[in-house]
Image (tube, rainbow, N blue to C red):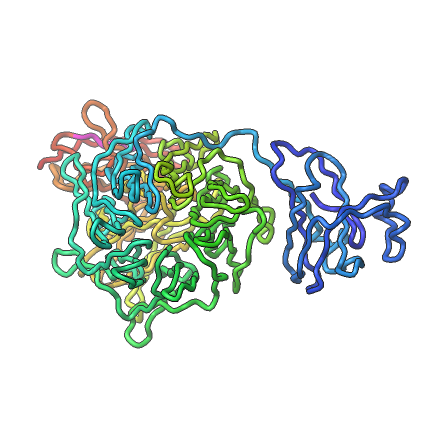
């Protein structure tokens, strides 16, 4: 609500506030800078002048209209021109009423540092934060077999491709070190331990599909019984069985009190590894390992040309911070000198040899002792913002990237914590990323876990509101978002210690999101094209940006799949079901927020390549994949500009709808059906078995008019190979003119 007032005196009429009162913040916009500071008080207007003071008050007649001033309730040490400033006034604003505020400088005079009511765009505002009367989260008491841990990590990932998010848990439980995998049964009805991994403490975990087979693999680091180790577990699929087996990766150093992440920093066909932490003895490390596949074995070699801060108590993340299509680095932790830092490194081309290297970015966030950092586009603009929580000193900060600098956001709203964790996720499906914070606060000392809702009033006026979620407070823990029960909203997994140091206080809990607002599916990208740059040996795979009902278009990310066969993913795995679009991991897409993906020519054999792209929203819900496009290596420019996403589509438009018999038939392992579309429209193509059960969904979205095709690789909707036999493919076409056509083809798979 906007103030009425004159000079340094403001009146707010607080009415219609619903929900439980949480916080009141006075927002003031700096008209002039100043170092003399501002004092905030409340005032009482004189009887008879309750209304006319705001029209008649001048610099010299205050005593005529002002009865009394309170003691100071808040202050600012300085004012910055062109920025919003916030002061907490919760001690006086607590119910429906009129509230009068007085601004004075250090001498008691009226300050002129802020825009007054005469401003047309930046009038003072009183922001009332409330806790909704609708509960948002409830602990899932039916899940009681997850081991409580601290000094470890938790990670969601659908390792068996059944559409349910499974959990890996690693760290210290009441009996010692552990690393375990729990399978999600029937949309979170229960979790069953299915795999015991190398027991680790002071550990970290991450999922990624390093062998590009469509099944997520696992990366673990930490301290075992004898030493620090880093292990790669390859997920092997044999029939309906999945098994995480150790994969040899001898060049990866082991670390404790560290962090790791999969990423593809040079945009080739191999996943790379970012690893940071406390190595053997007193050695600290932060290394980038470049993925490769000489022969049939995947390897990761340290890139010795990349120099990064050597850290322990580390937290790391990949992200395209400068929007150039290449993954940059965010690293935080403690140096050997016990100095702490948060550093961003830009991924840049080495002009001497064309390789990629990391240079410290010119724009850096403030430095702090951190336990956890996280990148997230929380306000839906062009840049990645960041949040961090403290390690030895209590601090919780969010910094918004605004062009050439990082600006702190609503610092008073966030409880400062140490030994903390931060994680972004859109819990209320409004399109803005919200913040989960856990850790130990001071004065008085207590363990907390909070969800802060992001309320965006303008690009430069953003508030964080504690929603009062009944979460167990922990420190030395981990937290992660995912839709474990498949109801369309994000739930929470929290682990850590509820006590100062008692091992019996270690917990791991799932909190179900019980809001009734589910996210809608974003639209599918269209207009796929490919160009090639001989100077950089890069293919640019481009598309038209999609849309979503909740997530702002600038915050949508995109997820690309590339293969050497139709519907293939052996070049770039989307870690998603290529038929339904459902993700195997709760994460943004591999192309980030840009409408293109840069593919490195390195490692690509000559031939035809097939690719698709999907849209990912802020609850990591994926659209259907686009119509497939192709490109050639070496590059063969198109003779004419294509109007459809299929590079092999003919430019002519058929007069009638038709579905051809598949070829080859019988087939193994894949087959193709040609499809004639006389106009633009929606196509639904589903594979059924002979008893009418849906086996796979090949297409469910819009396609443009022309001679198109569909491919099926003999896998079901969960990505598993189906058995030999007769199947039916039913295609339903609904054209933009209202035309509706159906056709069914009988196909035979023989193995």
216 sits left or right of 129 in the view: left
Name the image quarter holding the C terminus. top left
Compared to residue 634, the image places residue 549 above or below, namely above
Q: Which residues are magenta?
A: 727-731
Give 41 or 511, whichever is nearer the viewer.
Answer: 41
Q: Is residue 728 found inside the magenta-colored segment of the image?
A: yes
Q: Nearer the viewer, residue 43 or 243?
A: 43
Q: Residue at x 30, y 31 (%)?
A: 145
Tell which residue pokes out farthest to the bottom in this image: 352
Q: Main secondary structure of the magenta part?
A: strand
Q: Is residue 618 left or right of residue 62?
A: left
Residue 640 location (% of width, % of height):
32, 59
Residue 353, above or below 570: below
Image x and y of residue 481, in percent: 39, 41
- Residue at coordinates 46% horizontally, 43% vertically from top-left? 436
Q: Is residue 257 magenta?
A: no
Residue 485 falls in image quadrant = top left
User: Can residue 243 be seen here?
Assistant: yes
Where's the N terminus, which quadrant?
top right
**Residue 264 percent location from the top left of the image:** 30, 57
Q: Nearer the viewer, residue 707 or 221?
A: 221
């Amino acid at each position: 609500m906007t103030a009425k007032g004159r000079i340094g005196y403001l009146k707010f009429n607080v009415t219609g506030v619903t929900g439980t009162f949480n916080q009141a913040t006075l927002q003031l916009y700096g008209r002039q800078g100043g170092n003399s500071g501002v004092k905030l008080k409340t005032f009482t207007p004189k009887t008879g002048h309750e209304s006319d003071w705001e029209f008649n008050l001048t610099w010299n007649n205050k005593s005529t209209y002002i009865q009394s001033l309170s003691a100071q309730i808040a202050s600012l040490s300085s004012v910055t021109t062109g920025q919003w400033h916030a002061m907490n006034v919760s001690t006086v604003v607590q119910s429906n009423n009129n509230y009068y505020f007085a601004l004075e400088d250090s001498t008691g005079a009226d300050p002129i540092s802020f825009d007054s009511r005469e401003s047309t765009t930046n009038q003072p505002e009183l922001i009332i934060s409330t806790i909704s009367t609708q509960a948002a989260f409830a602990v899932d008491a039916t899940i009681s077999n997850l081991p409580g841990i601290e000094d470890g990590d938790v990670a969601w990932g659908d390792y068996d491709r059944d559409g349910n998010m499974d959990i890996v848990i690693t760290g210290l439980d009441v009996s010692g070190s552990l690393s375990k995998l729990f399978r999600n049964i029937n949309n979170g009805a229960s979790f069953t331990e299915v795999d015991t991994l190398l027991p680790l403490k002071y550990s970290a975990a991450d999922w990624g599909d390093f062998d590009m087979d469509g099944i997520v693999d696992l990366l673990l680091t930490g301290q075992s019984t004898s030493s620090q180790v880093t292990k790669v577990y390859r997920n092997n699929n044999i029939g309906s069985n999945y098994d995480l087996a150790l994969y040899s990766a001898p060049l990866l150093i082991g670390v404790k009190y560290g962090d790791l992440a999969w990423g593809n920093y040079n945009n080739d066909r191999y996943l790379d590894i970012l690893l940071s932490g406390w190595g053997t003895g007193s050695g600290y490390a932060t290394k980038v390992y470049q993925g490769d596949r000489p022969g049939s074995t995947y390897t990761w070699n340290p890139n010795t040309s990349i120099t990064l801060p050597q850290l322990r108590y580390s937290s790391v993340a990949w992200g395209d911070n400068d929007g150039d299509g290449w993954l940059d680095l965010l690293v935080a932790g403690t140096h050997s000198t016990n100095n702490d830092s948060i550093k961003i490194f830009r991924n840049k081309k080495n002009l001497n040899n064309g390789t990629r290297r990391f240079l410290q970015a010119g724009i850096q966030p403030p430095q702090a002792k951190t336990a956890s950092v996280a990148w997230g586009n929380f306000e839906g603009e062009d840049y990645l913002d960041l949040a961090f929580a403290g390690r030895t000193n209590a601090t919780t900060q969010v910094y918004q990237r605004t062009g050439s600098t990082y600006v702190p956001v609503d610092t008073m709203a966030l409880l400062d914590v140490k030994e903390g964790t931060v994680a972004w996720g859109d819990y209320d499906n409004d399109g803005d990323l919200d913040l989960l914070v856990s850790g130990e606060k001071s004065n008085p000392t207590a363990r907390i876990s909070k969800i802060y809702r992001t309320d965006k009033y303008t690009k430069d006026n953003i508030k964080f509101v504690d929603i009062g979620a009944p979460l167990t407070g922990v420190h030395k823990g981990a937290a992660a978002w995912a839709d474990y029960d498949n109801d369309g909203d994000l739930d929470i997994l929290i682990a850590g210690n509820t006590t100062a140091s008692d091992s019996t206080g270690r917990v791991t809990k799932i909190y179900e999101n019980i809001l009734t607002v589910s996210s809608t599916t974003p639209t599918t990208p269209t207009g796929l094209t490919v160009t090639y740059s001989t100077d950089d040996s890069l293919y640019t795979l481009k598309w038209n940006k999609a849309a979503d009902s909740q997530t702002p278009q600038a915050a949508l990310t995109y997820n690309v799949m590339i293969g050497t066969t139709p519907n293939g993913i052996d070049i770039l795995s989307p870690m998603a079901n290529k038929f339904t679009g459902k993700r195997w991991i709760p994460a943004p897409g591999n192309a980030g927020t840009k409408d293109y993906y840069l593919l490195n020519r390195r490692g690509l054999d000559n031939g035809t390549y097939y690719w698709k792209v999907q849209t990912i929203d802020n609850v990591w819900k994926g659209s259907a994949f686009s119509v497939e496009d192709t490109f050639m290596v070496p590059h063969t420019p198109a003779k004419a500009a294509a109007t459809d996403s299929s590079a092999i589509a003919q430019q002519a438009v058929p007069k009638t709808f038709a579905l051809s018999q598949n070829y080859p038939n019988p087939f193994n392992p894949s087959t193709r059906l040609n499809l004639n579309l006389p106009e633009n429209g929606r196509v639904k193509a589903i594979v059924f078995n002979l008893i009418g059960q849906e086996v796979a969904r090949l297409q469910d979205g819009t396609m443009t008019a022309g001679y198109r095709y569909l491919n099926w690789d003999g896998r079901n909707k969960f990505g598993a190979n189906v058995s030999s036999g007769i199947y039916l493919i039913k295609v339903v076409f609904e054209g933009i003119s209202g035309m509706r056509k159906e056709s069914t083809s009988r196909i035979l798979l023989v193995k």
